[in-house]
Image: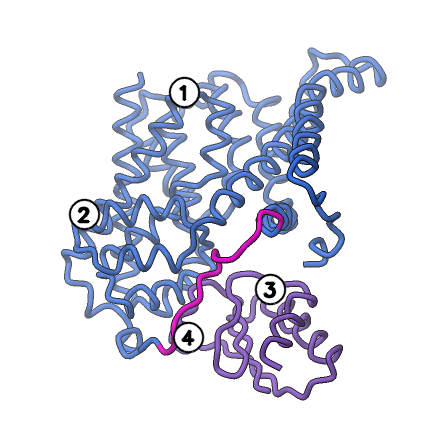
Chain colours: A blue, B purple
């Protein structure tokens, strides 16, 4: 919020605004291009460090990735927040209101990706959806897809691994959300939802936060979101990049292939059981994924690991416990985790 | 004037309350403040993205923390 007040106002004219935004884009591009050369020059030239030594490699990875990931985050969060400002949870609910299970699960999962939504609002959203007559299984498809198909993960996978891996991630993530929501709906889970949810009636009409925003508002909201997310996740980011750097520099190349390579049938299971309790951000996970991939871990295992970190987190489960009884919460975790494990094995089999 | 802040005690909810109190003071208005944290009650207002601001039983803002200026404008509309 404080940031918002310090932001310069965008120029009044349409031309001025595009100039300002293009200027920012050019600065971004320049920094992104310079990043590697800059650290080469500082570490090898200025400090005279040996490029072949493990310590130098670790430091280089850390410094280079910190700048690169921060730049990517700024771009991704800004662009996604701007685009999503045309959607809102209210609109999503209105769209889902008349949907039945089945088709509804498809639509809900898709909307989960494009709706501006934070897991921290999972409880009021769950109640709001159910009170508006959205079936529980459909609501769950939305709640699963939203963190699972993560926009930051999409942007980073695209830059680090290309569009094929990214497409696999998006399609399988959606598939898990659709199928998991559908299965949970079929289980007749109404009895496992806290009764007060069904007693909630909506009063008044909901306002649409996306309505009536100007272009400037949307740009400011996006800039503010960049600042607020970076402020929140930087510790996870630095720890993640640090671990990635250590793996990159110090773990022998055949270490993981020996213990968790394509030949190890338990690899995906182990990755998912580590990933579920681990609480991090997609951006914090990516440097580790990148470093582990270099060391020969198969992509399916890594995708499963990443999905389990972003889709299932302890804080969100604690929040959801307020509306879901333990049985449904356990079923939720079980079904989603099973889906992730299947995806992991499937892609290890297909991609190797 | 009756002001309600809807939100489960997150940092943004406190920021919203601060911005609203500033705006109320700056305009010299009299207002009672209420902090609603009960998820069922928040949802019953139709709010699905916290924090949200309710002025005299009407949701005027949800899902973001406005500047004190924005809140002032909202308060003036209902003054």
| Marks 2, 1 in one chain | yes
The span from disc 3 to disc 1 (Cα, nearest Å) is: 47 Å
Which is more N-terminal, label 3 or label 4? Answer: 3
The span from disc 2 to disc 1 (Cα, nearest Å) is: 44 Å
x 44%, y 74%: residue? B42
Report the chain holding disc 3.
Answer: B
In the rendered image, residue A160 lying in the magenta stretch gets the answer no
Q: Quarter holding the N terminus of chain A? A: bottom right
Report the chain holding disc 2.
Answer: A
* Front disc: 3 or 1: 3
Find numbered disc 2 in the image and state the secondary structure of the residue it sits on. helix
| Marks 3, 1 in one chain | no
x 51%, y 24%: residue? A159
Find numbered disc 4 in the image and state the secondary structure of the residue it sits on. loop
Q: Is residue A154 left or right of residue A250?
A: left
The span from disc 3 to disc 2 (Cα, nearest Å) is: 36 Å
The local crowd at label 3, few if under 14, some if 14 to 19, many if 20 or more residues have their Cα within 10 Å, is some
x, y percent for residue A118:
47, 54
Find numbered disc 3 in the image and state the secondary structure of the residue it sits on. helix
The span from disc 1 to disc 4 (Cα, nearest Å) is: 56 Å
Residue A53 sits above or below residue A169 on the image: above
Residue under numbered circle 1 = A258
Q: Is residue B23 left or right of residue A185?
A: right
x, y percent for residue A243:
59, 33
Find numbered disc 1 in the image and state the secondary structure of the residue it sits on. helix
Query: Which span of residues is magenta-colored?
Result: A203-216
Residue A305 sits above or below residue A188 on the image: above
Q: Quarter holding the C terminus of chain A? A: top left
Residue A252 sits above or below residue A133 on the image: above
x 60%, y 87%: residue? B1
Residue under numbered circle 3 = B12
């Amino acid at each position: 919020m404080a940031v918002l007040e310090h932001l310069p106002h965008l120029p009044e004219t349409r031309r001025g605004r595009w100039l300002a935004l293009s200027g920012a884009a050019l600065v971004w591009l320049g920094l992104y291009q310079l990043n590697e050369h800059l650290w080469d020059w500082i570490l090898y030239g200025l400090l005279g460090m040996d490029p072949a030594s493990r310590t130098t490699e670790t430091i280089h990875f850390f410094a280079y990735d910190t700048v690169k990931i921060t730049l990517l985050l700024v771009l991704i969060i800004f662009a996604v927040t701007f685009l999503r400002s045309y959607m809102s949870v209210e609109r999503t609910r209105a769209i889902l209101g008349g949907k039945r299970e089945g088709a509804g699960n498809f639509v809900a999962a898709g909307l989960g990706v494009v709706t501006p939504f934070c897991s921290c609002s999972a409880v009021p959203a769950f109640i709001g959806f159910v009170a508006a007559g959205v079936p529980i299984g459909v609501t769950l498809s939305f709640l699963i897809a939203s963190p699972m198909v993560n926009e930051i993960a999409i942007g980073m996978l695209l830059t680090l691994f290309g569009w094929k891996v990214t497409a696999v991630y998006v399609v399988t993530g959606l598939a898990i959300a659709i199928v998991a929501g559908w299965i949970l709906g079929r289980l007749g889970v109404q009895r496992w939802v806290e009764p007060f949810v069904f007693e909630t009636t909506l009063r008044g009409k909901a306002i649409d936060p996306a309505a009536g925003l100007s272009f400037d508002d949307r740009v400011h909201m996006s800039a503010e979101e960049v600042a607020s997310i970076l402020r929140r996740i930087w510790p996870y980011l630095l720890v993640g990049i640090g671990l990635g750097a250590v793996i990159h520099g110090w773990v022998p190349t055949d270490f993981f292939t020996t213990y968790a390579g394509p030949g190890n049938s338990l690899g995906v299971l182990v990755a998912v059981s580590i990933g579920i309790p681990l609480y991090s951000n997609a951006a914090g996970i990516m440097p580790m994924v990148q470093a582990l991939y270099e060391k020969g871990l198969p992509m399916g295992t890594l995708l499963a690991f990443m999905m389990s970190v972003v889709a299932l987190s302890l804080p969100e489960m604690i929040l959801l416990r307020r509306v879901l009884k333990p049985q449904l919460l356990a079923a939720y975790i079980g079904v989603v985790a099973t889906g992730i494990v299947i995806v992991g094995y499937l892609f290890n089999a297909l991609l190797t | 004037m009756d002001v309600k802040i809807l939100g489960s005690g997150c940092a943004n909810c406190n920021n919203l309350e601060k911005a609203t109190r500033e705006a109320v003071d700056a305009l010299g208005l009299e207002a009672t403040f209420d902090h609603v944290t009960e998820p069922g009650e928040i949802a019953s207002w139709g709010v699905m993205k916290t924090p949200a601001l309710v002025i005299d039983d009407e949701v005027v803002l949800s899902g973001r923390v406005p500047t004190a200026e924005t809140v002032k404008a909202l308060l003036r509309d209902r003054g």
